[in-house]
Amino acid sequence: MDCPFCPPALNPENIVLVNAHCLFILKHETVLIGSGLIVPKAHRVNVFELSVEEWASMYSLLHEVKQLLDQKFAPQGYNLGWNSGQVAGQEVFHAHLHVIPRYADEPLAGKGIRYWLKQTMNSRVQGHRQG
């Protein structure tokens, strides 16, 4: 298996926080400074494969991550997100939660996840999958 979030590919130096079932990887971003990923230690292809225990660890670690990022980067908000499946933008098939600090002085401040998804170029074919 060639997974960047599993040993041996995962560089331990990038792991900032760890708990029983999850770890936080701080990404070395030049645009989204302070962003990172919360990843289950066990290889899970997507978020729907997480166990109840992994969900609880994810929740607990998310609060630790927020405290760390608040102290280190002092953001005014956060975007949190999962991509599940290739059509949803998942590129690495090991479940991971994006944690992205946001700031009022960013050019796209106030533009959350819905901003991108609600663009007219993303409109679905009329009548397609309407229930």
Image (cartoon, helix red, strand yellow):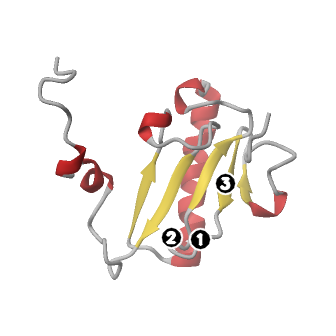
Residue 108, image x and y in percent?
Answer: 31, 71
Tell me the kind of residue under disc 1. Answer: Glu
> Where 73 falls versus 91 (above or below)?
below
Q: Residue furthest top?
A: 131
| Mark 1 Cα shell of 10 Å, populated few (<14), some (14-19), many (≥20) | few
Please give the label number shown on residue 24. 3
Tag 2–tag 1 contact (CB < 8 Å): yes
Residue that badge 2 annotates: 32
**Residue 67 rendering spot, x and y as whole percentages:** 56, 64
Residue at 65% x, 37% y: name it.
94
Which label lies toward us, 2 or 3?
Answer: 2
Q: Position of residue 97 (x, y in %)?
A: 54, 46
Classify 65 as above or below 86: below
Q: Position of residue 66 (x, y in %)?
A: 53, 61
Quadrant in which residue 75 is drawn: bottom left
Disc 2 versus disc 3: distance between alpha carbons?
A: 16 Å
Residue at the left extreme of this rendering: 126
Give the amino acid at mark 2.
Answer: Leu
Q: Earlier in the sequence, mark 3 or mark 1?
A: 3
Residue drawn at (16%, 21%) of the image: 130
Quarter of the image for residue 7 reads top right
Indicate left or right for 89 with 110 as reference. right
Near mark 3 (Cα within 10 A), the count class, few <14, some 14-19 or many ≥20, is many
Q: Secondary structure at mark 3?
A: strand
| Residue shown at the point (62%, 30%) measured from the top left | 45
Out of 23 and 88, give the one closest to the viewer.
88
Return the residue at label 1.
29
